[in-house]
Image (spheres, helix red, strand yellow):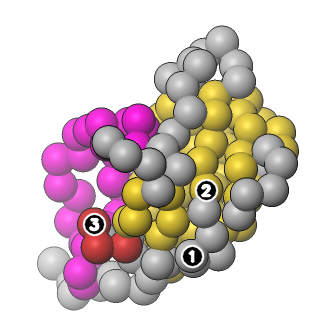
Amino acid sequence: MPDAIIPATARSEFTTRERCHITELLNDPRAPQVSLARCRVEAGVTTELHTLSVDEVYVIDAGRGAVELGGAPPFDVSAGDAVQIPAGVSQRIRNTGSGDLVFQCLCTPRFTEAAYRPLEDP
């Protein structure tokens, strides 16, 4: 197998303290410059307010939501929208639809647990 290929591993969805369901599509130390995850937020749920030490881009695949960035008023997002979130900016997303809100999350450099900083008590 060429070194350029990162083999697929079991990609199981898991739930985070952030109140989000995650499937990691790419998060490997051999590709430290980027990670990609499928995120799912259930109807009526708002994710935990937090910051990351990496840049993020959300690309909304399905559903509707309201994003809060840096303490500014929330703004609406829906399928096809992309949201740029610079490192260090407080953030959360609320599912405002009746079905799941699904989006891809691209992090640069790649996401690690050390990048996550909660801004709410558990």
Kind of element beneath mark 3: helix
Q: Give the side of residue 86 with respect to residue 38, left or right.
A: right
For the residue labelled by badge 1, is the local secondary structure a helix, a strand or a loop?
Answer: loop
Label at residue 113: 3
How many other residues sit within 10 Å of disc 3, few (<14), some (14-19) or many (≥20)? few
Most common secondary structure along the magenta stretch? loop
Disc sitting over residue 88 in the figure: 1
Label 2 sits on a secondary structure element that is strand
- The residue pinned by badge 2 equals 91
Residue situated in front as seen by the camera: 48 or 112: 48
Q: Tag 2 or tag 3, which sits nearer the N-term?
A: 2
Q: Amino acid at mark 1?
A: Gly
Q: Is residue 92 visible?
A: yes
Is residue 13 a member of the stretch shown in magenta?
yes
Q: Residue at x 48, y 35 (%)?
A: 40
Q: CA distance from mark 1 to mark 3?
A: 15 Å
Q: Is residue 61 left or right of residue 25?
A: right
Q: Is residue 6 magenta?
A: yes
Between 41 and 69, the one lying in front of the other is 69
Which comes sooner in the sequence, label 1 or label 3?
A: 1
